[in-house]
Structures are given as C-alpha cells and as structure tokens.
Image (cartoon, rainbow, N blue to C red):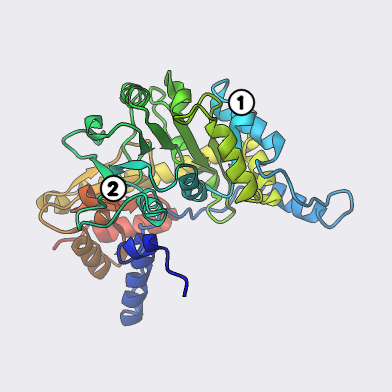
C-alpha cells in the first residue's frame, strides 16, 4: 500500500474553523430555539454591489454567444486585470508582469509552499492565520507538534507587551517569514517604521517575507502602509498576497492575486518570479474568467466607490463591537479589547480563562459565535476574536446580548 503523507499525520486534531462549525452544529441541535449569531469566521455577509455583480452577469450571458464565448485564459490572469491591479494598488511599485491572478489569497499561500519545499525554515507571527502553519506542516517543513507548537517553526509572539509586533532577533537566517498586516486575528496594523525593520532584517539575513495584505483596504490611517512595497528594499525580499474577498465580498466568488518582484532571487541567483510563473502555469489553470470580469469592475471608478462603502460598513460594525466590549460588565471581568479601526477584527483578552472556555460560555449564554484565539497560535490563548462581518441588525442584536454577559 502507498504510505500516507506524514505531514497530514502531524497536523493537530482539527482545523480551527471546521471545529467551530462542528461545535455550533452540536449546540444548535441541542438548543433548537436559540437564534445563533456568528461573529466568528471572517466571512463577508453583505451583497455584491449591483455594478460588480452586473459585470459578471453580463460576462456570463455573453458566454452564450459566439462573440462573447471564452475558453481557457492565461494562467497568470487577464492582462487587463493584471495591469489594473498594478495601477490601482501599486502605482509604480510593481508592474503587470509581476502580478499573478489567482482564486484567492488562501490558495496562493498554500501554493507558495511548493516554491520552497520541505527544507526551508519557517517563522510565523503568533497568533496568525492557521494556513501559514498548517500549510507548512503538510509539506513537512514544520516538523512534529511538541504540544507548544511545531518543532520546525519559529513562533513570533505578538502580544500586548510588544504592541503586537514581534521580536525579529528570534528568526534564524534564511527563513521564510509569514507576516500579515492588518493582522488576522489581532487586527494590529504595522507602521512604516515596523515594516522597515522587518524588510531590513530580511535582507540582512537572507529571508523571504510572505506578506499577507488581504485586509489592506480596511486601513483608514493614511500614515500606515497598505503594501509592503512602500518600504525601500521590499522588492528584494518580499512576496505580497492579496484578495478581493473582503473588500468586494468575493469570499465565494474567489479572486485574488500575488506580487512576485523580478528582483527577488533564490540563494543560487535564480528568479523566484520565473518559478512562481511555472507553479501558476503547471499547478493552476487560471482564475474564473467570470470572477476576473468582476475584478475589473471592482477596480473601475464605481467599483472602487462600492468597495469603500462596503468596508466602511464593516468598520462601523467593528466600532459597535468594541464599544460593547468596553462596557462595565466586561470591565468587571478584566477584559481588554483591541480594535484599531484599520481592520475588521476585535481582539479581546479574558484573563484567567482559556479561549475555548470563553467561546463555549459566550455561545451558551449569548448564542453568539466567536473564534478562540488559541486556534491562531500559543500566544492567542485567553483571547477570542470577534468578527465585524455581519448584517447591522445582527451585530446590534449580538451587542445587546453581549452587554449582559458575565461568567
């Protein structure tokens, strides 16, 4: 018999979000009267804008005509969309030939592992989006779980004490560094000075940064960088991954992109861009033509207005959640909530409690689903993440219930 990939055997018991879904199902089955509101998984809830949806609809209808039919497209993406992404988001910091269109940031992050194989050292923010760690485990770049994390991964605690920016000196030379800003789950957004430290460290130590910018459109502080390429030297050490999922509501439509600068090289001097092009043309067959039509509409004048309005809506939800967690009942429990106004998540610490204890208590007493912070890494213990993705009426109802919460 063929042996199982041992990377799967090394994974922890269950991926975070399916475990949340399982507990929710079990609770619903035993409490059918409960109206459960989810402030958990970061799934968008508001409809696509009519402008963006209309562009996809028109493209779909055109497929039924000889003139409008399209088959395979370029695996790297529609050339007009690549050019538009470079123009809108990078403004001379990256060109269209460095833009690769995909079916989403999560998929890109998983495929990126194939560029570096199992011998590369890994460093991740702690807490961090689980796919950085789990993807590394599957390709056997992480080693076995020690109970406090994986042996082959350097965890970089992002805590209240260090303002959620890690101590970089822990990172070994020639390491692949996963970094997300605005961060999921803490919501912390790196300053220009912090990213300069990160870029300078990477260049001085032969590291490559995988920079997850999926939430960059939530940044409202004009002093904060939206792309790592605003930082001098980043083109020599960083791949950036981004997505239409959160700003345009494309979580189900599936459309994202990565930027791989031509200056980025492996140790032998070979081009990372060329190898990524090979990955995208060999292991991927291109994003949906329909989704790419929606992406083009999202980046025209009306589409950009629509995306901003949707992001503003979610940010207002975040403010409501933060105000609730600053209430007297939570203060009495010693709860500290963090919300920057530049990301969609509220990160809250419940001293003396485990993350899953808090999850279960809030589900039981408020019928509200959150996300346990420990699922994002060891430093997330005692925290839970509240997502601002939700209908306003549900957010308001959830806040009303939470305002009465106590252990």
Question: Which residue corresponds to the image point at 32% horizontal and 50% vertical from the top-left?
Answer: 142
**In this picture, is 191 found above or below 387?**
above
* Residue closest to the eye, 287 or 313: 287
* Residue closest to the eye, 166 or 224: 166
Q: From the image, tell me which residue sits under label 2.
A: 152
Which mark is first along the chain, 1 or 2?
1
Left/right of residue 247 with respect to residue 316 in the rendered view: right
Label number found at residue 242: none
Marks 2 and 1 close (CB-CB < 8 Å) = no
Q: Which marked residue is nearer to the observer: mark 2 or mark 1? A: 2
Q: Is residue 261 visible?
A: yes
Question: Which residue corresponds to the image point at 58% horizontal and 45% vertical from the top-left?
Answer: 279
- Residue 368's spot in the image, x, y percent? 31, 63
Question: Which residue corresponds to the image point at 42% horizontal and 21% vertical from the top-left?
Answer: 231
- Residue 31's spot in the image, x, y percent? 31, 79
Specify few, some or many for label 2: CA neighbours under 10 Å numbering under 14, 14-19, or 20 or more.
Answer: many
* Residue closest to the eye, 393 or 315: 315
Specify few, some or many for label 1: CA neighbours under 10 Å numbering under 14, 14-19, or 20 or more.
Answer: some
- Residue 33's spot in the image, x, y percent? 34, 78
Q: Which quadrant does the C terminus fall into? A: bottom left
- Quarter location, residue 323: top left
* Residue closest to the eye, 61 or 273: 273
Left/right of residue 397 with respect to residue 247 in the rendered view: left
**In this picture, is 400 found above or below 379?**
below
User: What element does badge 1 sit on?
Assistant: loop
Question: Which residue corresponds to the image point at 59% horizontal and 31% vertical from the top-left?
Answer: 98
- Residue 297's spot in the image, x, y percent? 67, 40
User: What element does badge 2 sit on?
Assistant: loop
Q: From the image, tell me which residue sits under label 1.
A: 95
Disc 2 and disc 1: Cα gap in Å? 35 Å
């Amino acid at each position: 018999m063929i042996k199982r990939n041992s990377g799967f055997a090394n994974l922890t018991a269950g991926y975070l979000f399916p475990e949340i879904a399982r507990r929710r199902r079990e609770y619903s089955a035993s409490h059918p009267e409960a109206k459960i509101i989810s402030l958990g998984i970061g799934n968008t809830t508001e409809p696509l804008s009519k402008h963006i949806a209309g562009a996809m609809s028109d493209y779909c209808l055109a497929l039924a005509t000889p003139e409008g039919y399209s088959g395979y497209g370029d695996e790297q993406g529609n050339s007009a969309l690549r050019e538009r992404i470079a123009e809108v988001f990078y403004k001379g910091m990256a060109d269209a030939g460095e833009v690769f269109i995909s079916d989403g940031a999560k998929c890109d992050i998983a495929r990126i592992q194939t560029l570096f194989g199992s011998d590369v050292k890994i460093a991740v923010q702690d807490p961090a989006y689980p796919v950085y760690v789990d993807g590394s485990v599957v390709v056997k770049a992480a080693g076995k779980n020690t109970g406090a994390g994986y042996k082959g991964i350097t965890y970089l605690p992002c805590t209240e004490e260090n303002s959620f920016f890690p101590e970089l000196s822990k990172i070994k030379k020639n390491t692949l560094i996963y970094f997300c800003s605005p961060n999921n789950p803490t919501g912390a957004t790196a300053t220009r000075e912090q990213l300069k430290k990160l870029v300078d460290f990477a260049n001085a130590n032969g590291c490559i940064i995988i920079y997850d910018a999926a939430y960059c459109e939530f940044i409202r502080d004009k002093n904060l960088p939206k792309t790592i390429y605003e930082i001098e030297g980043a083109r020599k050490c960083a791949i950036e991954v981004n997505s239409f999922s959160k700003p345009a509501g494309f979580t189900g439509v599936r459309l994202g992109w990565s930027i791989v600068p031509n200056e980025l090289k492996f140790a032998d001097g070979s081009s990372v861009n060329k190898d990524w092009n090979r990955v995208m043309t060999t292991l991927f067959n291109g994003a949906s033509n329909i989704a790419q039509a929606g992406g083009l509409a999202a980046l025209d004048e009306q589409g950009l207005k629509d995306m901003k309005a949707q992001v503003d809506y979610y940010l207002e939800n975040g403010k409501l959640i933060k105000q609730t967690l600053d209430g007297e009942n939570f203060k009495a429990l010693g709860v500290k909530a963090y919300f920057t106004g530049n990301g969609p998540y509220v990160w809250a610490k419940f001293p003396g409690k485990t993350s899953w204890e808090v999850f279960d208590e809030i589900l039981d007493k408020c019928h509200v689903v959150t996300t346990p912070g420990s699922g994002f890494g060891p430093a997330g213990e005692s925290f839970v993440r509240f997502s601002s993705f939700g209908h306003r009426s549900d957010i308001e109802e959830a806040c009303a219930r939470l305002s009465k919460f106590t252990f």
